[in-house]
Image (cartoon, rainbow, N blue to C red):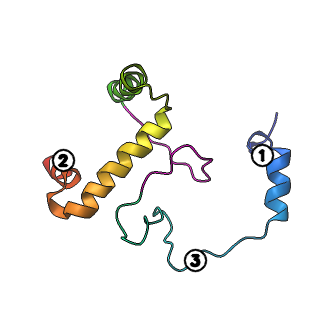
Amino acid sequence: MPTADDLFRPTSGQQAEAEAAPAEPEQASEKPGKAPEKGPDKGPAKPSGRVRHDEKMTVYLSSAELMAIEQARLRLRGEHGLGIDRGRLVREAVALVLADFEERGESSELVTRLVQE
């Protein structure tokens, strides 16, 4: 029976790159878990869009929430010609909520909804 290391090992190309590349220290201006800030005006950060992501987060959803995300994705494709995946849709939604929270703070939609729970 295979071990967890056998099942979750990096592919040969990724493993060679990971072993060859030395670990780079993070710059002082970047904080873990925070997206880089946008341009000189320091406005809200934009979502990363369609790029390879190094970090992963698992989120559990109800069937209704997952269905709503899938329906939104299909509407974006059908009504607006935007062929995006669910991950991109969720990253855009998170970016919008975080930008609203950064701009409006306590009166943001995020705080309002969380206080109501």
Q: Nearer the viewer, residue 1 or 82?
A: 82
Q: Which residue is mark 3?
A: 27
First in sequence: mark 2 vs mark 3: 3
Mark 3 surroundings: few (<14), some (14-19) or many (≥20) residues within 10 A: few
Is the residue 56 above or below the residue 64 in the image? below
Magenta stretch: includes residue 58: yes
Q: Which residue is mark 2?
A: 113
Tell me whether the residue at label 1 lies in contact with that at label 3, contact meaning CB atoms closer than 8 angstroms. no
First in sequence: mark 1 vs mark 2: 1
For mark 3, give the secondary structure. Answer: loop
Which region is colored magenta?
Answer: 46-61
Measuring 36% from the left and 27% from the top, which residue is drawn there? 72
Q: Which residue is mark 1?
A: 9
Position of residue 50 measured from the top left corner of the image (x, y, whole percent): 55, 43
Q: Nearer the viewer, residue 68 or 78?
A: 78
Q: Please state if 88 lies on the left or on the right of 95 as rendered.
A: right
